[in-house]
Image (cartoon, rainbow, N blue to C red):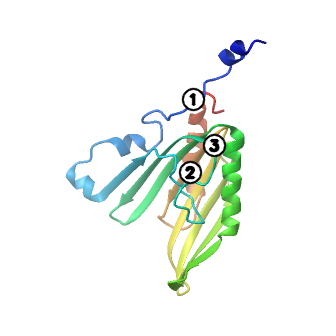
Amino acid sequence: MALSLLLALSPAAVTEIPKNFLLTEHDARRHLDPEEAQELEYKISDKLTRPLELNPCGYRRAVDRGRVAARTITLGTSAPSSSSEQLVLYASSRAAHAALARLRAEVKRCARKGDPSTPELTIQWRTSKAKAGDEAMGMGYQTRQDGDVNQTGTGIVARRGSALMIYTTDEGPYRPGGLTKDARKMAAKVCELPGIC
């Protein structure tokens, strides 16, 4: 088969994420009235160098390879609480799988860490099973100070084809199952993009 025919039959690679594609994006882009703006703060980033929202080793930049597009939406509230949604598209499903496998390894390597300047403060990471997309896992952490839990973070990371999607929240106890619905919804939606699934 001629190369030109092969190229015509293969789906185009996605190099950008369409506007308002993420589940929380419509809300994040709408104009907030002054009263809402005091309660909610959305931030949207398309930086490829932004680390994954689940980041047990605390990297300041992305360490995974093969990214072609990314969008991260974070929400901070006056409660105070925070949540995030992140979609990262890779050049291949192999690259997306490698990013998830690396994240799984990082949880083990950096499962428990502390700050030498505040030895009474430690962060404990863990994982759990999850079902979404082609593969997924629940992830989260507890921050302990002097033995007492003072913060909990919950997340889910799922892969579908060459896309990785992450949802996080710091509200309530560790329950990744509460985020599974969003991960499954995005795992289906991302197949609308050419070349992802």
Instruction: Name which residue type carries label 2.
Output: Ile
Q: In the structure shown, which secondary structural element does the residue marked by tag 3 occupy? A: loop
Q: In the structure shown, which secondary structural element does the residue marked by tag 2 occupy? A: strand
Closer to the chain start, of discs 1 and 3, is: 3
Categorize mark 1 by other alpha carbons within 10 Å: few (<14), some (14-19), many (20+). few
Question: Is the Cβ of the residue at disc 2 closer than 8 Å to that at disc 1?
Answer: no
Q: In the structure shown, which secondary structural element does the residue marked by tag 1 occupy? A: helix
**153 to 117, vertically: above or below:** above
**Can you say which quadrant of the picture contains the N terminus?**
top right
Looking at the image, residue 183 sits to the left or right of residue 10; the answer is left
Closer to the chain start, of discs 3 and 2, is: 3
For residue 66, the mark is 3
Name the one closer to the observer, 175 or 70.
Answer: 70
Q: Is residue 81 visible?
A: yes
Count of numbered labels shown in the rendering: 3
Categorize mark 2 by other alpha carbons within 10 Å: few (<14), some (14-19), many (20+). many
Image point (70%, 12%), residue name: 5
For residue 166, the mark is 2
For residue 192, the mark is 1
Image point (50%, 34%), residue name: 16
**188 to 77, vertically: above or below:** above
Single out the residue that lies furthest toward the front.
3
Question: Is the Cβ of the residue at disc 3 closer than 8 Å to that at disc 2?
Answer: no
Residue 80: quarter of image:
bottom left
Instruction: Name which residue type carries label 3.
Output: Gly
Task: Give me the C-alpha separation between circle 1 and circle 3.
Answer: 20 Å
